[in-house]
Structure formats: structure tokens, C-alpha cells
Image (spheres, coloured by chain):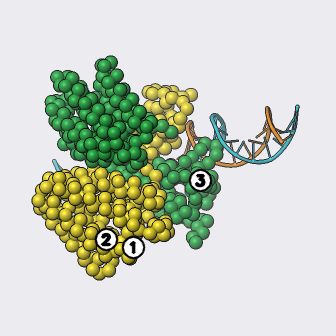
Chain colours: A green, B yellow, C cyan, D orange
Amino acid sequence: MITNHETPPTRGVQLSEQVARQLTHAIHTGEMRPGERLPTEATLGERYGISRSVVREAISMLRNAGLVTSRRGSGSYVAEVPTVALRLAIPDPSLQSVIRLLELRRALEVEAARLAAQRRTPSQLRRLRNAMADIDEAVEVGADGVDQDMAFHRAIAEASNNTHFTAVIDFYNRFLHHAITVTRTNESLRETFMAQVIEEHQAIVDAIAQGDEDAAAQAAGRHLEHAEWRLRQAPVDLLERLEDTASSEPTNDTGDAR
Amino acid sequence: MITNHETPPTRGVQLSEQVARQLTHAIHTGEMRPGERLPTEATLGERYGISRSVVREAISMLRNAGLVTSRRGSGSYVAEVPTVALRLAIPDPSLQSVIRLLELRRALEVEAARLAAQRRTPSQLRRLRNAMADIDEAVEVGADGVDQDMAFHRAIAEASNNTHFTAVIDFYNRFLHHAITVTRTNESLRETFMAQVIEEHQAIVDAIAQGDEDAAAQAAGRHLEHAEWRLRQAPVDLLERLEDTASSEPTNDTGDAR
DNA sequence: CCCGACTGATTTGTCAGACAACATTATAAA
DNA sequence: TTTATAATGTTGTCTGACAAATCAGTCGGG
């Protein structure tokens, strides 16, 4: 056991990072158990011979890594459910890149639909139908219905009763938001497209409702294939405007529930 | 005393988090382009009407999220490849949980095999065959061949020529390593299983080599189905030993290359 | 004209101390 | 015993300062 009561961090690298590593190690090895409270910032600073600022930066890293949570007035605690992070580059909004995302989405949603057909609870089926109705409603009002569309697909993922699907789909859908918007705002083709989309959605829901997994998977696969086709129909100039619409829109993407 | 020159952060939440969100938004929307230098900490503090400490905490979050890098004496810069993180709880090693992972893996690999059949380059096909040979070799020597097996599946993902697949598959495979090991170390059934596995792998590679996408997808689907079945055959006591083997390993996840 | 060393200003990293906001615990009152 | 109140502890934020590294410009010599 390494009793580093006074371990002067080796010079060269960032102090905060070294401390963060030591704390991370302590958590990973189970030396500090989930739910346990960390020593106070003052204590840690004294122990490592550093100022409170550095301790705070180090803890900030752990917080960001999902390893601890801090409560003002109380202390910092090892997270109950330690997490790992998949970090990847933000996809550029080119057509090629968006299509790559659609391919992944297809992989996930086809299987999600299949699982949903096997496992959906009655309430999940109800939510699916509500989500579909929401799309109609939004379109009738004149909105693009993109948010409602994404909620619909999220409902399918939820009905699969496999949290991994919802996590990954949610993660990637952020980057598809603008692409879908472009397809929807393609004025000339909009009505035709919307009719198609609604029809395809209906097929998926019907299959899930009947518990026909192969039909559900097929319907989902067709839907995503057609989605790619519809995207390709969008004029190039619309696609290029992706970035502009992105910067002008107040996308509160980080507004996740607590 | 607080002179809110620009946007007064709404009270209630952490100041640093609010600022971090604004900056994150600016980067995500491309308002600040990769490589560009951020305003100095002092400037940002003045602009948002907050102290430098808070600015530093906010920037620290961005740094941890991989969105910016800081150079002492120079400034903070938007990372050349801005990243986003998918964070999720570390799956427990229960049979139920592992099967959930296999479901996701099936979704991904079926589609990856389909894409690989369409797009694999000759060199990728060669690598696939080498990976398959490596498995045989490892098994003949007496090793479990788990690492080689995972490399094989990674080669399929790479042959899909869609980086999203490799990223997600890599990410989740970490948690499947032990589960696969368990299946392989099931002494009584090992030989039968390995023969099956090799046969199934061969079917996938053949389909990919011939460019038959439907056959490749089917073969991959069958392989993953059988994998789940094989896992279920493993005695319960073996599955329970998963946790021990898992906790004894030094997971150095923070050691990413620079 | 070009180039290198030097100087000074700028900027992030760290330190130190203080107060505010909130949480927890101990204490007193009913 | 239960409830209000005070005291204490802890994180969040503010302020000011210095160290260390970078950067821009100046100057002198080739």
C-alpha cells in the first residue's frame, strides 16, 4: 500500500492532472467506493501539498469524467454508477458524412424495431402511437415536425427495452437533426415526402403492435433506405446551408434532464 | 458590482456550467472554428461579468470534453478535431446485461458485414483472412483466441469503411471480452464451439469476398445468434466468476495517445 | 537585407485569502 | 420527543498576486 501522505507531484506535467490521476486510480481500484465522500478540498490540498485551486481543477476533471458528483455545502462523492466515455470527432455536415450516420442509424433502428416487436409493453405501444400523432399534429400546424420525428424514433428505441440502443441513437441523432430539417424544408417535395414518411412510420408501428419482428425490421429498414433517398433528392444548395441554419438556431442540445 | 456586459447568466445553476454551455454551443455551431484562439480568460470574465475562477472552471470543462486545448503563455484554442462524448454506466457483468450488449453488437455487425460486402478493398479482404488465420493459429497453440476473435470482428467493421461502426463496436467490445472468454474456457464444449465459430466466420468472409451483401448480413446475424446461444450454455458458476476477472485488471482508459 | 539574441508585454498555471450559499450537526426550546 | 435555532463545515465564487511560458517587436551584427 502506498501511503503517500506527502507526495510532491513530479514536475513537468500539469499538477491538476497528476492529482486527478491519483484520485482516478483510487476510485478505479475500489479504494474509494461508490457513494463514499472524498476528503475536503482543503484536506486534499494539504495532503498533496498543493493549493485549493489545483484540487478544484482535479476534481473538476473527475466530475467531467462522471466519476464524482459535488454538492455545494456537503462535499464531493464518488458516483454511484461510474461511467466510461466514448469520445469521437464531431461529424462534419457534408452529405457524405450524414449518409454515414444514416447507415449507422439504420443498423440500430432495424434491430431496435425487431426487439420492440418482441418486447414492447402496452404503454410503450401507446407512447409510440402518440408520438406518431404528434408528428401529424405538428405538420398540420405548419411546423417541420423534426423534433417530433426524432421523438418517434426515440420511442422505438425505448420500446426495445435495451438502454444501449437508446443511448447510442440519442447520441448520434444530434448530428442528424439539421440534415432531417433540410429534407423537410425542401418545399417542392415536402408534401409527397411527408405522406411517404407517415406511411412508413405506420408500417413500423403496425408490425410492432402485432409483434411481427421480421416485418418490423423490414419496415424500419425500408424507412431508413427511403430516408437516405429523400436526403439525396434535396438540392445541393440546401445541404450547404446546413451550417448557417445551425448557427442561427438556438439548439438547446445540452438541455438534458437531471 | 457585477457588470453584465453581454449575457447575464440566469441564476440557479452553476455559473461555470452556464458559461461552458455557451462556449460549447459556439464551438458546435462552428461560430468558433477549429484552431481558432478563444478570448483570454480575463476577457471572457469581463464579457460575462464573472471572475476568472469561473472562466477557468468553464474552460476546464471544455478541455476535459476534448473541445479545446490550452497552452500556458499562449491561450486556449478550439481543438482541431472537436469531440463529443457518449457516456454511459459501466455495464455489470451479469448474463442479462451481456446479452443486451450482444443485441447491440448484432445490430452493428450485421450491417457492418453488409457494408463490407459492398465496399471492402482487396487489402481489407486480405486482412480479414489473416485475422481468421490468426484465430486458428492461436487455438492450435492452446490459447483461447479471444483477442484474435475480437480483432477479426474489428476487421469486419473496418471493411465497412464507416468509422462510426468501428468506434461504437470498439467501445462496447471492451465489456464483452470477459464474456467471450467465459464461453471459450467452457472446457466440455470448447471443441464443438470452436468448430462452429470457425465455420460461421468462414461463411461471413466468403460472402464479403463475393460481394454478396445479403448473404454477408445473414451470416453475421446467424453468427451472433449462435454466439448468444453458446453463451447461455456456459455454466452459471463460470458466469459468476466474471466479476473477479474483471476487477483484477488494470483498466488504464485514460491513457490515450497524443 | 536577413538573422539571432534580447526585452517587454501577454497569457495561462498556481498560490493565498476571503466571503457567500448551502448542508450538516449540535444545541436549545417547546 | 419533537421542533426551531444556532454553530460549524464545505463547496462555489470573488479578488489579487506571482511564476512560467509564449509571443511580438527591437536592436545589433553579419
Pinpoint residue B92: horizontal percent, then vertical percent. 47, 58
Q: Residue A174: percent from the left, percent from the top?
A: 33, 38
| Residue B10: percent from left, percent from top | 51, 29
Do marks 1 and 3 share a chain? no
The residue at which mark 2 appears reads as: B193
The chain to which mark 2 is attached is B
Q: Amino acid at mark 1?
A: Asn
Q: Nearer the viewer, residue A21 or A71?
A: A71
Q: Secondary structure at mark 1?
A: loop
A204 over D8 or under it: above or below: above
Q: Earlier in the sequence, mark 2 or mark 1?
A: 1
Q: Residue at x 23, y 26 (%)?
A: A195
Classify mark 3: residues with Cα within 10 Å, few (<14), some (14-19) or many (20+).
some
Verify CB contact (< 8 Å) between mark 2 and mark 1: yes
* Vertical position of residue A174 compared to residue B238: above or below: above
Name the secondary structure under disc 2. Answer: helix
Q: CA distance from mark 1 to mark 3?
A: 36 Å
- Identified at 33% across, 27% down, the residue is A135
Residue drawn at (42%, 63%), measured in percent from left and top?
A: B252
Residue A235 in the figure: left or right of residue A132: left
Question: Can residue A79 be seen at all in this image of the molecule?
Answer: yes
Q: Nearer the viewer, mark 2 or mark 3?
A: 2
Can you identify the residue that label 3 sits on?
A35
Q: Does A227 sit above or below residue B225?
A: above
Q: Residues within 10 Å of mark 1 (few under 14, many from 20)?
A: some
Task: Tell me the number on the disc at residue B186.
Answer: 1
Is residue A190 visible in the rendered image? The answer is: no
Image quadrant where residue A245 sits: top left
Q: State which quarter of the image contains the N terminus of chain A.
A: bottom right
Q: Residues within 10 Å of mark 2 (few under 14, many from 20)?
A: some
User: Amino acid type of disc 3?
Assistant: Gly
